[in-house]
Image: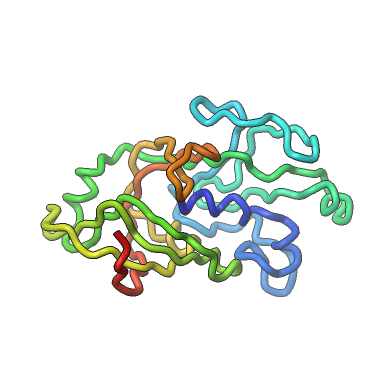
């Protein structure tokens, strides 16, 4: 669900106008800079197996395989026809799917490596906070568990989180096999999102939630 929210972040216009996590202080963008852990690669491809989507954007531009982040480095941003013409660059449609590279760690491996942490299976009621840090708030749902000394010890209350996705992808420690997920809040198939399970060093669980 969180990766679904990343799609709109790869916008050249918001970066050029200083309204984005990908804006360079003083002007310009951070394309070419390493912003995430070196294991983070994010791409889109309308013909990717199990993530097929329309080969054309809403304005008729053809969609091609694109790499947005490679080995932690921001490689490109999307530009509408209007913004591309204004900036005198080629238009580049926004991603219609998102595919994040993974690793070979099993969820069991991740759990065993944790001394004390939280195992989260689903996020819900996700809302934007700050586009300059790609920050969102939301709650956990459908199974949240305490990990102690490499084992799931018990279920715990759900939590509200306030988290920057930039900071999240900076703190990756382990990645599982990429899997297509139902990324919409209603669990519909929706936009094709393919992501691995992640173990991260820190995730901001800000308060206890009474959500089911």
Q: Residue at x 66, y 49 (%)?
A: 76
Q: Is residue 45 left or right of residue 209?
A: right
Is 129 or 187 nearer to us in this picture? Answer: 187
Q: State how many labels appear.
A: 0
Residue 45 lies, with reference to residue 201, above or below; the image says above
Residue 100 lies, with reference to residue 153, above or below; the image says above
**Residue 23 picture quarter:** bottom right
Q: Is residue 104 left or right of residue 48?
A: left
Coloring applied to the structure:
rainbow
Q: Is residue 61 left or right of residue 210?
A: right
Residue 201 lies, with reference to residue 189, above or below; the image says below
**Residue 34 picture quarter:** bottom right
Q: Residue at x 25, y 40 (%)?
A: 106
Query: Where residue 136 appears, x then y in whole percent?
Result: 49, 65
Q: Residue at x 36, y 39 (%)?
A: 103
Query: Where residue 14 appears, x then y in whole percent?
Result: 71, 62
Q: Residue at x 30, y 50 (%)?
A: 121
Query: Where residue 33 appears, x then y in whole percent?
Result: 60, 58
The quadrant of the image that shows the C terminus is: bottom left
Q: Is residue 123 left or right of residue 191?
A: left
Residue 151 lies, with reference to residue 202, above or below; the image says above
Query: Where residue 1 appears, x then y in whole percent?
Result: 46, 50
**Residue 98 picture quarter:** top right
């Amino acid at each position: 669900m969180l990766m679904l929210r990343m799609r709109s972040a790869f916008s050249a216009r918001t970066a050029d106008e200083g309204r984005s996590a990908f804006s360079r202080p003083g002007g310009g963008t951070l394309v070419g800079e390493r912003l995430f852990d070196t294991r983070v690669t994010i791409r889109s491809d309308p013909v990717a197996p199990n993530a097929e989507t329309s080969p054309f954007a809403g304005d008729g531009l053809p969609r091609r395989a694109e790499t947005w982040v490679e080995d932690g480095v921001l490689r490109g941003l999307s530009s509408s026809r209007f913004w591309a013409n204004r900036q005198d660059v080629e238009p580049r449609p926004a991603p219609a799917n998102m595919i994040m590279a993974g690793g070979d760690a099993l969820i069991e491996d991740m759990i065993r490596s944790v001394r004390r942490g939280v195992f989260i299976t689903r996020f819900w009621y996700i809302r934007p906070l700050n586009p300059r840090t790609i920050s969102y708030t939301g709650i956990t749902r459908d199974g949240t568990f305490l990990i102690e000394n490499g084992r799931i010890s018990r279920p715990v209350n759900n939590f509200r989180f306030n988290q920057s996705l930039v900071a999240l992808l900076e703190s990756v420690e382990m990645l599982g096999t990429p899997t297509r997920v139902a990324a919409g809040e209603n669990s519909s198939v929706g936009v094709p999102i393919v992501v691995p399970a992640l173990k991260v060093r820190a995730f901001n669980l800000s308060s206890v939630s009474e959500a089911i």
